[in-house]
Image (tube, rainbow, N blue to C red):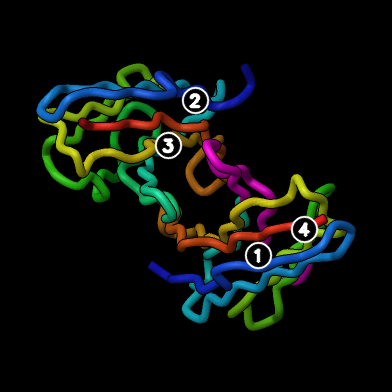
């Protein structure tokens, strides 16, 4: 498709488990961003990549969160030892390059039981 | 990061023009003003972006005064399907977008 693709669309898991969330950006977009959105709030920045490297990870809440983009295209957000407070919608966005309008996927709704 | 302030909610009727104003008193010289629309269970959708004066595209217009301390998103002749949350966001030197709580627009029949 032409847009940002995120999988899975929904993920339910138990507290303490490990999860991986995948983002497939728009083809050719070099910048990729992860955000987290809680109910009733705007998205909050987590991390962004320019190419393969994490250019800014200042929004990651703690060291249980990690993201990679090994080939400069698909990215995976990884959460270890999940907690109930990690429940949220995780959004991915991409842009042609940093500073250009960001285009969002529909997110992964993560529920930690 | 510069912050934005928008009304929490607005109601309108079908066919009317809707103007949503955003305040950004501390906007930086290299900040652009971007508006996003978000429907439930979907990601934010880019609507329009501008730096100064007026920008128009097929869905909206964006008015920015000379001092750039505010901006107004104008939606002509809204329909029920325009009911959504609208976010005003500054983007420029900061790579990440900083979203506020947005404006819930409800279009009534």
Residue A98 part of the magenta segment: no
Q: Which mark is residue B108?
A: 4
Is residue A85 rendered to the left or right of residue B55?
Answer: left
Mark 3 — on which chain does it sit? A
Q: Nearer the viewer, mark 1 or mark 2?
A: 2
Q: Against B31, is A48 above or below?
A: above
Q: Which mark is residue A25?
A: 2
Magenta range is B37-55
| Callouts 2 and 3 in the same chain | yes
Quarter of the image that includes the N terminus of chain A: top right
Quarter of the rendering containing residue A110: top left
Quarter of the rendering containing residue A103: top right
| Callouts 1 and 2 in the same chain | no
Label 2, secondary structure: give it. Answer: loop
User: Can residue B60 be seen from the camera position used here?
Assistant: yes
Q: Nearer the viewer, mark 4 or mark 1?
A: 4
Mark 4 — on which chain does it sit? B
Quarter of the image that includes the C terminus of chain A: top left
Mark 1 — on which chain does it sit? B
Q: Earlier in the sequence, mark 4 or mark 1?
A: 1
């Amino acid at each position: 498709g032409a847009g940002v693709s995120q999988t899975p669309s929904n993920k339910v898991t138990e507290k303490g488990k490990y999860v991986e969330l995948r983002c497939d950006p728009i083809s050719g977009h070099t910048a990729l961003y992860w955000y987290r959105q809680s109910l009733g709030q705007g998205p909050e920045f987590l991390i962004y990549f320019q190419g393969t490297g994490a250019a800014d990870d200042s929004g990651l809440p703690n060291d249980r969160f990690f993201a990679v983009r090994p080939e400069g295209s698909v990215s995976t957000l990884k959460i270890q030892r999940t907690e109930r407070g990690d429940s949220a919608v995780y959004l991915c966005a991409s842009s042609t390059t940093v500073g250009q309008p960001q285009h969002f996927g529909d997110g992964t709704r993560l529920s930690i039981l | 990061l510069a912050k934005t302030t928008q009304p929490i909610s607005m109601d309108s009727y079908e066919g009317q023009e809707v103007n949503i104003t955003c305040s950004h008193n501390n906007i930086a010289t290299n900040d652009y003003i971007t508006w996003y629309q978000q429907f439930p269970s979907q990601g934010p959708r880019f609507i329009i972006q501008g730096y100064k004066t007026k920008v128009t595209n097929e869905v909206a217009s964006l008015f920015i005064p000379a001092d750039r301390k505010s901006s107004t998103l104008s939606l002509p002749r809204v329909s029920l399907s325009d009911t959504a949350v609208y976010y005003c966001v500054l983007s420029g030197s900061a790579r990440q977008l900083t979203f506020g709580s947005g404006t819930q627009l409800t279009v009534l029949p």
